[in-house]
Image (cartoon, rainbow, N blue to C red):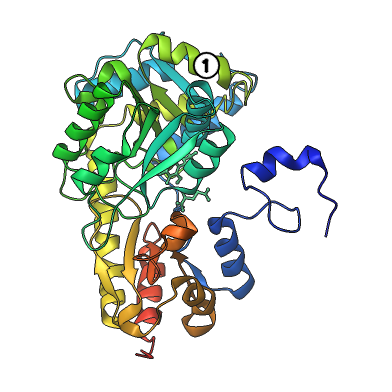
Amino acid sequence: MRQAGPWLRAAEGAMLLGPDGVPAPTVFAEMSALAAATGAINLGQGFPDEDGPVEVLDAAVAAIRDGVNQYPPGRGTPDLRLAVSEHQSRWYGLEVDPDRQVLVTAGATEALAATLLAFVEPGDEVVTFEPFYDAYGALIRLAGGTHVTVPLTAPDFLPDEDILRAAFSDRTRVVLVNTPHNPTGRVLPDEVLATIVELAEQYDALIVTDEVYEHLTFDVPHVPIATLPGAADRTVSISSAGKTFSTTGWKIGWLTAPPALVDAITSVKQFLTFVNGAPFQPAVAAGLRLPDAVFTGIAAELSAKHDLLADGLRAAGFELMRPDGGYFVIADAAPLGYEDAREFCLQLPELVGVVGVPVSAFVRPDHAAGYRSLVRFAFCKRRPVLEDAAARLAGLTSRA
Ligand code: PMP
Ligand code: GLN
């Protein structure tokens, strides 16, 4: 046991350290390590196992060769900011000034971090749905905020309107929305988005929306909350190239917001990473300008991959909740006799050579009831890999 000096208090206070003083690994890192150690198929951490559009890759290689290798401008290269602005207009009819309303960040994660650090003070409340992406909880704690959650419960993973309304108060500084949602795959219906905007107006809260899976929806449109009446003036919209272009390792994200909000977030961002990814910025600009058919093709392929994995999971006896979008499907292991998904996920490599992630990792320990037997499987993998995983999972014997 290491001596935990008082200088560890901040990290301890944010509950980022394990009991022995080393960083508590995220569930994604833990399960990827398990997959690597056992040789199991990794359907845990959400990253694709093949490259995205070749135009995007070629543009990055060309940029490196052309000497685009030094610090880019603080807000991002003007051309990427223009491409983001064009993208918002082309897909959603949102007009944003590329010079004053766009900020390029080190992935969506830095956009979230800089935004929460810029606006949340100790005592402020931040409302999110639960389950929530792990970084939300950690970043809210680092900002000193109080995390208030609204449950999304199986099987439909929609919020109860009364609970959503009750989550807001005069202390609510930010409501942090994520649609399409990780881990449930739910695309929040327009009525829910409208209620959020109404509540944000009533309590003068900022809306922060994480839309990294914006182009990965299956037969349902993605509606950015910023397009709703009254929302744009109080909304920070966040996205990332990682999911759309299968470049999760590049860490190019961006946000769009009213100029004063972008200025405040930039003031924090410049001391987090300063800047990042110079040669990847023109490549992402090229990606954002690809024809519509490329984007719809990516979603169609992912939807087919969902079906492939879902067939295997259903054959194995899991009960499934169909996602509207994103990389993941939630499977209930209870019908197979596994009530504790974490224990099940730790055994799964040995049982059939597959790795998944327990949904309990996305909820607070005291809120785990209702999620205990749920497992998240990623289907952003090559078809033969999914076929193999589906066949392996279909061989699971029920212990029910
Ligand atoms: N938000 C959500 C909902 C995510 O699933 C992820 C990661 N996959 C991120 C943010 C982080 O995105 P980035 O890698 O661009 O930081
Ligand atoms: N967002 C990815 C997921 O949900 C993982 C990213 C990470 O490992 N931090 O699986």
Q: Is residue 18 above or below residue 7?
A: below
In the image, residue 115 sits, relative to residue 361, either above or below, namely above
Above or below, comparing residue 283 to residue 27 in the picture = above
Is any atom of residue 281 visible in this view? yes
Is 225 left, or right, of 58 in this rendering? left
85 or 238: which is nearer to us?
238
Q: Is residue 193 left or right of residue 51?
A: left
Q: Position of residue 177 (x, y in %)?
A: 33, 37
Q: Secondary structure at mark 1?
A: helix
Please name whichever residue, 277 or 7, is drawn nearer the observer in this view of the structure. 7
Q: Quadrant of ligand 1?
A: top left
Q: What x and y, as percent, mark residue 86?
A: 29, 19
Task: Determine if the C-beta at disc 1 is less than 8 A from ligand 1.
Answer: no
Image x and y of residue 180, in percent = 29, 44
Residue 97, image x and y in percent? 34, 10
Classify the position of the C terminus by image quarter.
Answer: bottom left
Find disc 1 in the rendering and name its residue. 266
Of the 4 image quadrants, the one containing the N terminus is bottom right
Residue furthest to the right: 3
Image point (32%, 26%), residue name: 289
Specify whether residue 248 is in view: no
Q: In the rendered view, would you say 202 is above or below 318?
A: above
Side (left or right) of 28 relative to 52? right
Residue 276 falls in which quadrant of the image?
Answer: top right
Between residues 3 and 162, which one lies in front from this camera angle?
Answer: 162
The residue nearer to you, when weighing 147 against 104, is 147
Q: Amino acid at mark 1?
A: Thr
Residue at image coords 59%, 28%: 64
Question: Is 334 positioned to the left or the right of 267 in the image?
Answer: left
Q: Residues within 10 Å of mark 1 (few under 14, many from 20)?
A: many
